[in-house]
């Protein structure tokens, strides 16, 4: 009997997503991405190939052209990892219909994914590390649709004078770079030798939800929770039945108040880091505009990975969709509230052969603290 057996493709693990149609021929493997619960969304994939060492693989995802953002697959390279710690990129083509990943694995087991995954186990490790730090209080807000804990971290001691800063990530679970960014931000905030972190904690208290959508994360969804809801369209009227994740966080925000909110995402199509502001909310006036411009310009000064030439069209005055977190928070609390988008592909103003990576996302998270410090006194 051969030691390695026949080539196999599996995705029955945390954040796995692929359907195998036919894997008999390694040079023409036929695959499909499974849809999210609810709406017709899909794009996230994550699977393992075993016993394919030295085989010239052509992994064809046949429904890629019908994915939520097919333009996300143009000029895109899939992520690859052997050790699940280091992530590289492999040759990938897209003809408008089929996404083909081309690789010859050099080891017996290899993982391919849309972006470097951020597993729920890693999330649990992050929260466990956090609760061991001084100045950190943990609160379980309640449960997701499928009964997973909704984790909230409070960093710093609240008092009436301190600014209240909320940071939330992964409303869209396939946008894993969001939690990588938050990990970088938190680790810096925990570093008692970091003067910027110390200065901020003197003036502010942080409330951080590293993962808004644990069910979707585990299921390998792109956008929805287990009830099929796009959480970033649920902020106007969340319910405990269909969007408890938003309901619980919103309730806590009402209790704490909010002076600053950063909602962290990833964008499938645009190869840039950028901010989408709450420009279209009725309360968006000169004060919020000045704060937002100040934040974006400071971010650009602090890191060449950031820019403001490329981004979403700006909502006309009063036209904002108040079911989105950034807009609902900005309108409800009259505060600086922004969505931060990172690329799945690369930051094209500073391209790298590995594309956008967890390391770059973590660093961008650390930089947020420098930037926040530059506006902290003006937030209220
Ligand atoms: Zn998103």
Image (cartoon, rainbow, N blue to C red):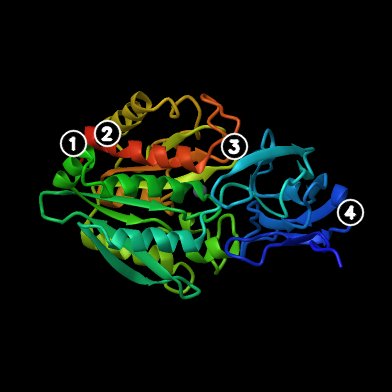
Left or right side of 116 for 279: left
In the image, which is nearer the foreground, mark 3 or mark 2?
3
Label drawn at residue 378: 1
Give the Cα distance between marks 3 and 2: 29 Å
Of the two numbered discs 4 and 2 on the same chain, state the one appearing first in sequence. 4
* Element assignment for label 1: helix
Verify CB contact (< 8 Å) between mark 1 and mark 2. Answer: yes
Of the two numbered discs 1 and 2 on the same chain, state the one appearing first in sequence. 2
Residue 236 is at least partly visible in this image: no
The image quarter in which residue 346 lies: top right
Q: Which residue is mark 2?
A: 291
Give the Cα distance between marks 1 and 3: 35 Å
Of the two numbered discs 1 and 4 on the same chain, state the one appearing first in sequence. 4
Q: Position of residue 44 (x, y in %)?
A: 63, 53
Verify CB contact (< 8 Å) between mark 4 and mark 3. Answer: no
Of the two numbered discs 3 and 2 on the same chain, state the one appearing first in sequence. 2
The image quarter in which residue 130 lies: bottom left
In front: 323, or 376?
Answer: 376
Label drawn at residue 345: 3
Label drawn at residue 281: none
In the image, which is nearer the foreground, mark 4 or mark 3?
4
């Amino acid at each position: 009997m051969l030691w390695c057996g026949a080539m196999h493709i599996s995705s029955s693990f945390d954040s796995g997503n692929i359907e195998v149609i036919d894997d008999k021929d390694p040079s023409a493997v036929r695959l499909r991405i499974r849809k999210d619960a609810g709406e017709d969304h899909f794009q996230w994939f994550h699977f393992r190939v075993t016993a394919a060492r030295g085989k010239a693989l052509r992994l064809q995802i046949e429904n890629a052209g019908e994915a939520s953002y097919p333009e996300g697959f143009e000029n895109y390279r899939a992520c690859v990892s052997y050790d699940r710690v280091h992530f590289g990129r492999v040759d990938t083509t897209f003809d408008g219909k089929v996404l083909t990943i081309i690789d010859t694995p050099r080891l017996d087991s290899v993982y391919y994914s849309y972006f470097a995954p951020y597993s729920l186990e890693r999330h649990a490790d992050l929260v466990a590390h956090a609760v061991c730090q001084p100045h950190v209080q943990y609160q379980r807000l309640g449960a997701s649709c499928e009964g997973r804990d909704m984790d909230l971290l409070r960093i710093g001691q609240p008092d009436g004078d301190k600014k209240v800063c909320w940071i939330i990530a992964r409303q869209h679970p396939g946008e894993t770079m969001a939690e990588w960014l938050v990990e970088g931000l938190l680790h810096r905030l925990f570093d008692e030798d970091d003067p910027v972190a110390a200065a901020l904690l003197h003036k502010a208290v942080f409330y951080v939800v590293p993962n808004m959508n644990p069910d979707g994360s585990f299921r390998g969804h792109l956008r929805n929770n287990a009830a099929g809801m796009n959480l970033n369209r649920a902020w106007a009227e969340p319910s405990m039945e269909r969007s408890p994740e938003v309901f619980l966080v919103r309730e806590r925000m009402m209790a704490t108040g909010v002076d600053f909110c950063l909602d962290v995402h990833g964008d499938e199509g645009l190869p840039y880091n950028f901010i989408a502001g709450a420009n279209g909310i009725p309360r968006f006036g000169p004060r919020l505009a000045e704060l937002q411009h100040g934040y974006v310009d400071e971010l650009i000064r602090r890191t060449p990975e950031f820019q403001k030439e490329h981004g979403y069209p700006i909502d006309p005055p009063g036209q904002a969709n108040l079911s989105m977190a950034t807009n609902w928070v900005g309108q409800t609390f009259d505060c600086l509230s922004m969505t931060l988008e990172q690329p799945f592909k690369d930051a094209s103003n500073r391209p790298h052969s590995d594309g956008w990576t967890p390391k770059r996302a973590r660093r961008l998270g650390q930089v947020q603290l420098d930037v926040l410090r530059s506006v902290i006194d003006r937030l209220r």
